[in-house]
Amino acid sequence: MVIMLQSNLRSKQITKCVPLLSIIIMDHTPSEPQEGCQVSDGVSVEDIADIEEINALTELGTTLIQAILEKEPIANIQELIDAGAPLWFQDNDGVSPLHAAAYVANENLIKIFLDDGAVWNAVDNLGNTAGDIALSMNNESCYKLIRDAGIRSELLLAILSSRSGLEHSSSTLIISDDDTTAVGSTDAFLASSLEFTVDEYDQEICLLKPEDDSKVGVMMSWEREIMSRTVDELCSDHPRLEEGLRVLNIGFGLGIIDSCLQRVTKIPSLHVIIEAHPDVLVQMKKQGWYQQPGVKIMEGKWQDVVQRKEFLDLGAFDVIYTDTFAENYQELCKFFRLLPDLMVGPDARFSFFNGLGATNALFYDVYSRVAECHLSDIGVHVSWNDVWVGGEEDQERWGESRKYFTQPLYRLPVAQLKSTV
């Protein structure tokens, strides 16, 4: 089973590949076939054996789900599992045994299934995980069991992948990087054309237009509340605010957060913006950012810029923010590891656009916590602030562009170096 987060934080498009048992119905029945021979229209004995095995697994899996939904004793359910009923099985509606256990709110079964390897992030035909089912039923204990299993799974897979040097497992959601389009590949994105325009709802947007003629928002005006709150959390009570903060932002987009940073009570003494996309750089020049006092534009990928002497000579920063497009989670983690050298000290603050898995409530929760764990590993503490971004206008704000954030609450991270005292 594969569920992949499109490889960056801002495109946030989740592609779901769910296991389905495809059963081929043959019109011919062999008559006393010999092992290894071909039987009727190229169907071999091995093919028939495979079909019989699939039918048996389907029957066992279906029976297991029915037994769970009918609340049969755990002993009966364990017998089915011991007989080979697959926990990864999903019926015609995409319901798995874990989904069924969530429907009947059976914590014991959920624990058993997760311990035995049930797929925590499998989605049904409506796009719901077992965790989503538990959440919809206000069952916090069942939800936390599934969420915590997801966190453990992702952290373990990340460790194993980094140590083994093997290709990242297909069972992980965030450690995937096989999208070579402009939506998922940095190089393809930087070679693409962007459109800066105003949509039918009079909101300023920056659009990427893939080859399939769809519209993908690189940045949209509805994010202003998020950016405004982010700057407020990063700057408003910063102990160095009145001295003029030293600010670093990676990814200009529509310039929303940079404009907010320029409006703090004391203008930053240094405001560095790293931007790589040629079309964005042209837009920045048109808007006069290159001539803005105290603003320094550094062109190129951040991975390259941070190694230049010109950048290193600037020293550390009081406030750091990153919001890139078409970069995967591994790249964000690489940036995390730079923070101890980029931040002035425990008073310095860091945030990033948190769109990890933001088209699904469970995924968003799991990967926000995974990011928190990875930051903690490098000595950075994270606090979270919820920003309401739902409401009746939610449908209108997207226009014709692809949705990349569907949660009613945005989880705003504010990170600081842990004090060594």
Image (cartoon, rainbow, N blue to C red):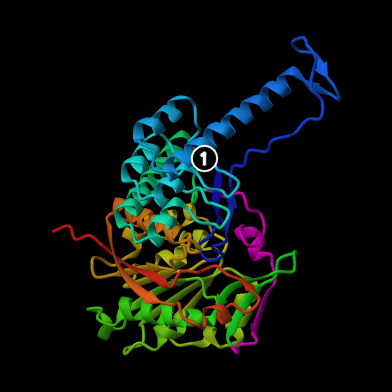
Residue at which label 1 appears = 169
Residue 160 located left or right of residue 244: right
Query: Picture coordinates of residue 31 (x, y %)?
Result: 80, 14
Most foreground residue, 397 or 25: 25
Helix, strand or loop at disc 1? loop
Q: Residue 98's quadrant in the figure?
A: top left
Most foreground residue, 341 or 11: 11
Q: Residue 411's quadrant in the figure?
A: bottom left
Residue 29 located left or right of residue 173: right
Q: Residue 338's quadrant in the figure?
A: bottom left
Residue 47 located left or right of residue 342: right
Three-letter residue code for mark 1: Ser
Query: Picture coordinates of residue 139 (x, y %)?
Result: 33, 57
Q: Which span is picked out in magenta?
A: 176-202
Q: Main secondary structure of the magenta part?
A: loop
Please say whether residue 191 is one of the residues in the magenta stretch.
yes
Query: Picture coordinates of residue 29 (x, y %)?
Result: 79, 22
Query: Picture coordinates of residue 344 (x, y %)?
Result: 28, 67
Q: Is residue 19 above or below residue 52?
A: below
